[in-house]
């Protein structure tokens, strides 16, 4: 194949800041300057800024960064929100290079959430950057998949709004399938995540470069309280970081011309898929059809199987996402190859939409040393949007391929279950997933559930308030519940 149409990642860079307060643009400039050598800078035709999630970045992040870098790409753009976005950008860039319409692109993302919070602007939740005026006359063009509509009034009305509450619901299903209580599931998850901390300990760009034992992750001592069953605080993605990462995706010909071919890592394949948007409408709450579809398609496009992969990087915002990824990869959750090269979002850091840029950069660095094949999986929303990439130290035999997931996506979409917004008092249902949410003092504040009515419809429900003090650590999956009269959303008591 013509080298001008072989897509590679020729340069990567990462940075973090623990000292002086910075903003997104400061970090983006720093990491972009690191990744762009004098030979690459004039070759960049497109600069894409990964949309900020945690700290405001303005409506012209790409244009402002171009001015600081003093480069002149023809395209300056930013993305919609979603953790899968960086991997999607690499796949898009590789496809454009393979098609001969692009030579080189810079992908850069930055989140200065630590600094933003330190300045007293952290807000009630860490999700503060969604106020960008994308419709401003001088705004950078926006690319990427839609980033709205992932929750309905049914979920939101019972408290299933933040990822810290929704992902534990998925884990309740996995606990029940394994025959574990919440406490037993917590210990299992701690054993799953302890190896992640050891990877983070060796990662120079990790926010928490300290190894932890499973006992430490499961323990509720030293402030490691239970946030929402079965998770302790240290099992959640940590968003308050100042981190940035950048990638240059270009043709092999460009890499050769600027002297970077020896370090280039080849993009073998990419695939994207989306789960049923509303969690309450998904057929299976403990698995991701979208991720399974994307992984299978990326593997097929690359002509490989899981046994041929040297390293994986699963999106690891919460333990349920890790378990979903292992299932999608077709490997054991404790596979000896591990499921992360960074250490994961709770330990390496969870910089908003940009974690996957760090994951890909770290995978590239690893493959340069070890050789072989690496797989990066990224997700956005509530395990909603998925992007998967296969990378190799050698070129793919059949060239880069984008997988076609159209037919599989239609099957996923057709499987959406109807969700009832109201129920009659006295009706009964079977709990299919739930969590118990605690405040900082350890008191139960809510117990949202997703249940199946006897007519097959799903319903999102909240616990009758008088039940909350007695619900500590109780796994309800499979239990019957009965709906009681209430002002507001469907409210249940134990049947």
Image (spheres, rainbow, N blue to C red):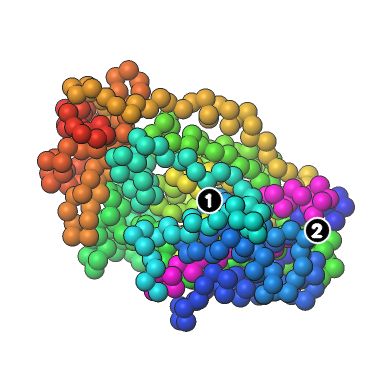
Residue, far bottom:
20
Residue, far right:
2
Q: Position of residue 268 (x, y in %)?
A: 71, 49
In this picture, residue 18 sits left or right of residue 144 = left
Q: Position of residue 325 (x, y in %)?
A: 49, 46
In this picture, residue 9 sits left or right of residue 16 = right
Q: Position of residue 313 (x, y in %)?
A: 54, 55
Neighbours of disc 1 within 10 Å: few (<14), some (14-19), many (20+)? many
Name which residue lies at 25% across and 49% down. 437
C-alpha separation, residue under disc 1 versus residue under disc 2: 26 Å
Q: Is residue 106 within the magenta segment?
A: yes
Q: Nearer the viewer, residue 435 or 320?
A: 435
| Residue 82 image label | 1
Name which residue lies at 49% across and 56% down. 131
Determine if residue 12 is in view: no
Give above or below for 264 relative to 382. Answer: below
The residue at which mark 2 appears reads as: 103
Magenta stretch in the rendered image: 91-118
**Element type at mark 2:** loop
């Amino acid at each position: 194949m013509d080298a001008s149409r072989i897509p590679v990642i020729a340069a990567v860079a990462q940075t973090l800041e623990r000292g002086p307060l910075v903003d997104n643009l400061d970090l983006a400039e720093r990491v972009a300057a690191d990744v762009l050598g004098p030979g690459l800078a004039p070759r960049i035709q497109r600069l894409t800024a990964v949309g900020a999630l945690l700290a405001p970045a303005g409506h012209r992040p790409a244009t402002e960064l171009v001015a600081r870098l003093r480069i002149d790409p023809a395209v300056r753009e930013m993305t919609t929100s979603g953790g899968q976005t960086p991997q999607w950008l690499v796949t898009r860039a590789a496809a454009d290079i393979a098609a001969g319409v692009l030579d080189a692109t810079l992908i850069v993302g930055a989140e200065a959430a630590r600094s933003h919070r330190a300045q007293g602007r952290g807000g009630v939740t860490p999700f503060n950057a969604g106020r960008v005026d994308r419709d401003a006359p001088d705004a950078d063009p926006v690319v990427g998949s839609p980033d709205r509509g992932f929750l309905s009034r049914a979920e939101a009305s019972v408290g299933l709004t933040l990822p810290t509450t929704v992902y534990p619901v998925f884990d309740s299903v996995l606990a029940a399938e394994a025959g574990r209580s919440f406490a037993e599931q917590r210990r299992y998850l701690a054993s799953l995540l302890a190896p992640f901390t050891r990877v983070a300990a060796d990662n120079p760009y990790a926010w928490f470069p300290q190894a932890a034992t499973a006992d430490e992750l499961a323990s509720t001592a030293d402030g490691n309280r239970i946030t929402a069953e079965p998770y302790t605080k240290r099992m959640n993605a940590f968003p308050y970081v100042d981190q940035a990462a950048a990638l240059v995706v270009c043709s092999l010909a460009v890499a050769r011309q600027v002297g970077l071919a020896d370090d280039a890592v080849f993009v073998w394949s990419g695939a994207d898929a989306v789960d049923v948007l509303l969690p309450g409408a998904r057929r299976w709450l403990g698995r991701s059809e979208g991720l399974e579809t994307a992984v299978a398609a990326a593997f097929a496009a690359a002509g490989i199987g899981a046994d041929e992969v040297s390293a994986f990087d699963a999106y690891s915002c919460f333990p349920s996402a890790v378990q979903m990824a292992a299932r999608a990869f077709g490997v054991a959750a404790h596979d000896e190859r591990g499921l992360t090269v960074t250490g994961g979002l709770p330990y390496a850091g969870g910089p908003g939409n940009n974690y996957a840029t760090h994951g890909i950069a770290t995978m590239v660095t690893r493959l340069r040393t070890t050789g072989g094949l690496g797989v990066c999986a990224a997700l956005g929303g509530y395990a909603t949007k998925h992007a998967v990439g296969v990378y190799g130290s050698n070129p793919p035999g059949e060239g880069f391929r984008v997988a076609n997931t159209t037919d599989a996506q239609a099957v996923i979409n057709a499987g959406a279950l109807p969700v009832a917004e109201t129920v009659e008092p006295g009706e009964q249902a079977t709990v299919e997933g739930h969590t118990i949410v605690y405040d900082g003092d350890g008191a139960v504040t809510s117990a949202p559930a997703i249940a199946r009515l006897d007519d097959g419809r799903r319903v999102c429900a909240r616990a009758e308030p008088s039940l909350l003090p007695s619900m500590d650590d109780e796994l309800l999956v499979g239990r019957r519940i009965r709906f009681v009269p209430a002002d507001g959303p469907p409210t249940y008591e134990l049947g």
